[in-house]
Amino acid sequence: MKSILITGASSGIGAAIARLAVRDDYAVGLCYRSNRRGAEEVAEAIRDDNGDVVMLQGDVASKSDVTKIFREFETFYGNPTVVVNNAGIVAPKVRFEDMEEMRLRKMFYTNVIGPFMVAQEAVRRMAKRNGGNGGVIVNVSSVAARLGSGGQYVDYASSKGAMDTLTIGLAQEMADQGVRVVGVRPGIIQTPIHGKGGEPDRADQMAGHIPLQRAGTAMEVAESVLWLASDAASYVTGSILDVAGGR
Ligand code: NAP
């Protein structure tokens, strides 16, 4: 049985990946932190599609929660075939010198240390040297990593830069371990994240600045993630795919 563990699957891009994963015959570990209702809606939709799903609650910024999520997952589905490091946050626009320490800690714990800990748990189960059967880790970064987001949120952009480097370096370390490590860099995608960052209309406002003249959909990102995770992408590792409408 193929299985996929997706962090941040109660909303937006993660929810779309979870919904689409059923089409590709994955049993789904649907991770969420606080939005239980959102997670339940996604789980219900998966069951309506005759999919197999388990909901896993936890904060990716907490080592004990990450460990718990993987332990619970394996009692249902064994070692995951695919792990998607998708959970992430933005914060309101602010000048660089005004970014408070707590904001920086939260940003880097959630967007960098969390994904590192998730990838560590994945590697412990997937790598041949640890007795695993291989697998794929997909990191959801952002085009902000290469644009820098100056005047907006340099902290967020930097956290995604760290994620891109994780993809490249871990792919090298895992290349002889049966584990591929890949990434996607979404551009402006229509999801609730913009409202959480204090800009609910950001996707519509930015449309004219995107070469394809529109924001992307969570499903368009999910399609790319599932292709990268699939055997169709068997010779792809250490690569990061822009899904950004040309931005
Ligand atoms: P979203 O709709 O706000 O969903 C974020 C998800 O992450 C939610 O399921 C949330 O869970 C989860 N999450 C946040 N903090 C968490 C924590 N500490 N522990 C566990 N889960 C946590 O956002 P999205 O737009 O789908 O974003 C998904 C990923 O895509 C993020 O990494 C984001 O940076 C990236 N991205 C998004 C865009 C865009 O335009 N939307 C562009 C580039 C990159 P709960 O709600 O249950 O707490």
Image (cartoon, rainbow, N blue to C red):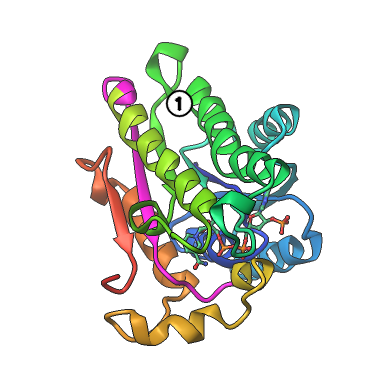
- Quick one: 90 or 45, which is closer to the camera? 90
Mark 1 is on which residue type?
A: Met
| 70 is within the stretch colored magenta | no
Whole-percent x and y of residue 72? 72, 34
**Vertical side of 80 occupied by 8: above or below:** below
Quadrant position of residue 117? top right
**Which residue is the site of mark 1?**
126
Which quadrant, please, contains the C terminus?
bottom left
- Rendered-image quarter of ligand 1: bottom right
What stretch of residues is rendered in magenta? 173-191
Q: Which residue is drawn at the image coordinates 54% and 38% (left, top)?
A: 112
Q: Which residue is drawn at the image coordinates 80% and 59% (left, top)?
A: 36
- Quick one: 126 or 149, which is closer to the camera? 149
**Vertical side of 87 occupied by 59: above or below:** above
What kind of element bears circle 1? helix
Whole-percent x and y of residue 144? 41, 58
**Vertical side of 59 occupied by 212: above or below:** below
Q: Which residue is drawn at the image coordinates 55% and 52% (left, top)?
A: 96
Q: Which residue is drawn at the image coordinates 37% and 47% (left, top)?
A: 183
